[in-house]
Image (tube, rainbow, N blue to C red):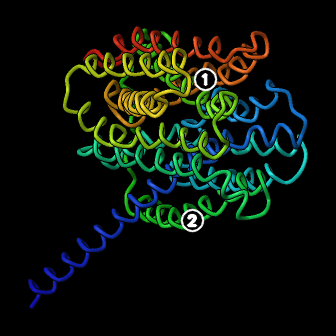
Amino acid sequence: MKKKAISVKTEDESAASKGATILMIVGIMLIAANLRAPLTSVGPVISEISYSLKLSNFLAGMVTTIPLIAFATLSGFAPRISNRFGMETTLLVSLVILMLGLFIRPIDGTASLFLGAALVGIGITIGNVLMPAFIKNNFGHSIGLMTGLYAVSMNLTAALAAGFSIQIGQITGQGWRGSLGVWIFLAALALVFWLPQLKRHRRTTRHQQPAEVESSVTIPMYRSKLAWSIALFMGIQSLVFYCAAAWFPKVLQSWGMSAVDSGWMLSTIQFAQLPLAFIGPIIASKMKSQVPLVWITALLMAIGILGMILFKTDFIVLWCISIGIASGLAFSLAMMFFVLRTKNGKDAAEMSGMAQSIGYLIAGCGPPLFGMIYDYTQDWSYALVLLLIASLSLLVFGIIAGKERTI
C-alpha cells in the first residue's frame, strides 16, 4: 500500500510539474508578445500623430526613439535589479510599468505622449534583458526551441500591431489614440499569466536555498572584443528594424501607397520574420559557428534595402520579404549569441544587459537620423542608404560574434 501511495504521489507531482512548465511557457510567450507590439503600432499612424500634435519629422521619430533611449540607458541595470529581487518579481514589475505607460501615452498632448513612451520603454527594457537569461536558467536543454518560441511570439504580435494599427483606431473611434492604447489589454493578460511564476519562485526559495552562481568571465565584459561585437551586432540589427517600424509606412505613403497598404507592408516584414525567428535559434544552436548564417542575413538585408532604393514600390512585397527574413534571422542570432557565448545564466544576463544597453543606444539614433536625412535632402533614398551601410556593418561584426568561443 505504501508503494502504491508513493507512486500516486509521484505521478501527481509529475503532472503538477508539467502544468507549471506549461504555465511558464505561456507566461514567457505573453511577455514576449508585449516587447514589440507597443512600438510597431506607432509606424502606420505616425503621420496622424504628427498632424494631430503638429510634430516635426524629428520629433515624430522620437516617439519610437524614446523607448530605445530607455533600452540604452537602463539595460545595464536590469541584471542588478534582478539579482536583488529575483527575475520573476522584476519581470512582474516591468509589466506594471508597461501598462502604466500604455495608459498614459495616448491620453492627450505631446508631454503625455513622450512620458508614456518613456514608461513603455522602461517596461520593455527589463523584459528584453532578462528573458534570454530566464530561458537559459529554466530551459537549458532546449534553449534553441524556447528562444524560437519567444522570438515568434514577439514578432507575430509586432506584425499584427503594424497591420491592424489603423483599423484598430477606426474601430475604436479614437484614431491613433485607440491604435496605441489597445495594447494595455495584452499587457494585463501577460500580468495575469505571470503571477504563478512569482508563487513558484517563492515556493522554490522557501524549500531550498540555491547556491549563488558565480560569473565565469575572467575580464570585465566591457573589455571583451567578442562582447563588443555582439553588442554592435545587436545594435545594428535593431537600428534597421526600428527605422523600418518608424518610417517605412510613411516612406511608402510618400511614394503613392495608401496608409492601410503601407501598414500591411510593415506587417509583411514582420510575418516574413516568423519562420526564421523560430527555426533560426534551433539551427544556430546546432552549429559550432554561426558565420554562414551571418552571411545570409547581411546579403538578404542589403538586397531588400537596395531593391527599395532602386525600384521603390515596384516589387515591394519581394523587398519586404527579403528584409523580413534577414531581420528575423538577425534578431535570432543576437538572442542566441547572449547564451551561446556565455557559460551560465548570470553571464548571459550580464551579456544581454551590456549588448542591449550599447545596442539600443545605437538603434535609438536611427529613427531621428533617418528623419533628419529626409528633412535635409527631401529624398527617402538617401535615408535608405543609411540602412544599406548598416547591413554591411552587420556582416563585419556578425563574423566576429559568430565564431565558436565564449567570453
Identify which amino acid the numbered label 2 is placed on.
Leu
Comparing 349 with 182, the one in front is 182
> Residue 279 in the image: x percent, y percent?
28, 40
Q: Is residue 379 above or below residue 266?
A: above
- Front residue of 158/147: it is 158
Where 113 sits versus 305, above or below? Answer: below
Residue appearing at x 64%, y 63% in the figure: 185
In the rendered structure, which amino acid carries the disc numbered 1?
Ala
Circle 1 residue: 363
Q: Residues within 10 Å of mark 2 (few under 14, many from 20)?
A: some
Can you name the residue that lies furthest to the bottom here?
A: 1
Q: CA distance from mark 2 to mark 1?
A: 29 Å
Where residue 140 sits: x, y (%)?
28, 43
Name the residue carrying label 2.
189
Q: Relative to 59, is 301 on the left or the right?
A: left
Disc 1 secondary structure class: helix
Residue 335 at least partly seen: no
x 57%, y 36%: residue: 80
Residue 287 shows in the view = yes
Where, quadrant-wise, is the N terminus in this rendering? bottom left
The image quarter in which residue 340 lies: top left
Left or right: where does residue 358 sit relative to residue 140? right
